[in-house]
Amino acid sequence: MQEIHLVIAKNLKMLRESKKLSLEKVAELTGVSKTMIGQIERGESAPTITTIWKIANGLKISFTVLINQPQPDTIVVSKSNIQVLSEDDGKYRVYPHFPFEDSKRFEIYSVEIDPGGFLSADAHMAGTEELLTIFDGELTIRVNDEEYTVRSGDSIRFKADRPHSYENSGDIMTRLSMVLYYPN
């Protein structure tokens, strides 16, 4: 993990250059001296929280834009590094490959359900949808007093802002991909 002042240095320089602002202009907008802005950008100075807030407010950006490390363009997620979540005495297992991020409106999981495995889910926030693709086995989904059986190779999309349930209604493990999409 990179030291925070070096992360801030990279982020500030990138932001300033992308907005085509001079050091003088950033100093004028933020109330932080040109010398200090230069030192921060070069990683020579670790700014205080107050200074970071001045810069964020002056540039009309969020505080986290300055302190977050940019994500790489490509990320490989190894299943062995994912913290599995389980229900129904371990018969229902969820692997959060891409958990929710504020900048994205979705999250992606893989799910394994042993034969007879069951999960009852509460309603998610209004407008939430789930998109499932079954790779092995079959899955019975109940939503709105309706029942749907989806088999290997099939997909289903449904409004998940109401109670719903999943059950492996077959005799082999069900494996599926789950995308939860959240409205703005």
Image: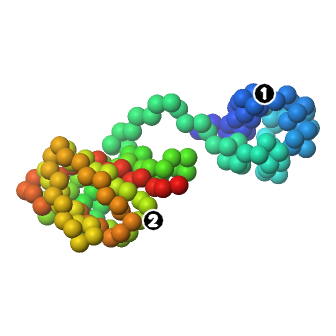
Q: Tell me the SS state at disc 1.
A: loop
Identified at 35% across, 69% down, the residue is 162
Count neighbours of disc 1 (C-alpha within 10 A) and say few if under 14, some if 14 to 19, many if 20 or more: few
Q: How is the image coloured?
A: rainbow
Residue 87, located in which quarter of the rendered image? bottom left
In what quadrant of the picture does the N terminus appear?
Answer: top right
Residue 76, located in which quarter of the rendered image? top left
Q: Decide if residue 165 is in sight here.
A: yes
Viewer-proximal residue among 6 and 10: 10
Which residue is denoted by mark 1 in the rendering?
20
Which residue is denoted by mark 2 in the rendering?
126
Q: Tell me the SS state at disc 2.
A: loop
Identified at 85% across, 28% down, the residue is 22
Decide if residue 102 is on the left or right side of residue 97. right
* Residue 108 locus on image (x, y percent): 38, 48
Q: Residue 122 — which label? A: none
Decide if residue 117 is on the left or right side of residue 57. left
44 shown above or below 168: above
* Residue 67 locus on image (x, y percent): 68, 44
**Which one is earlier in the sequence, the residue at label 1 or at label 2?**
1
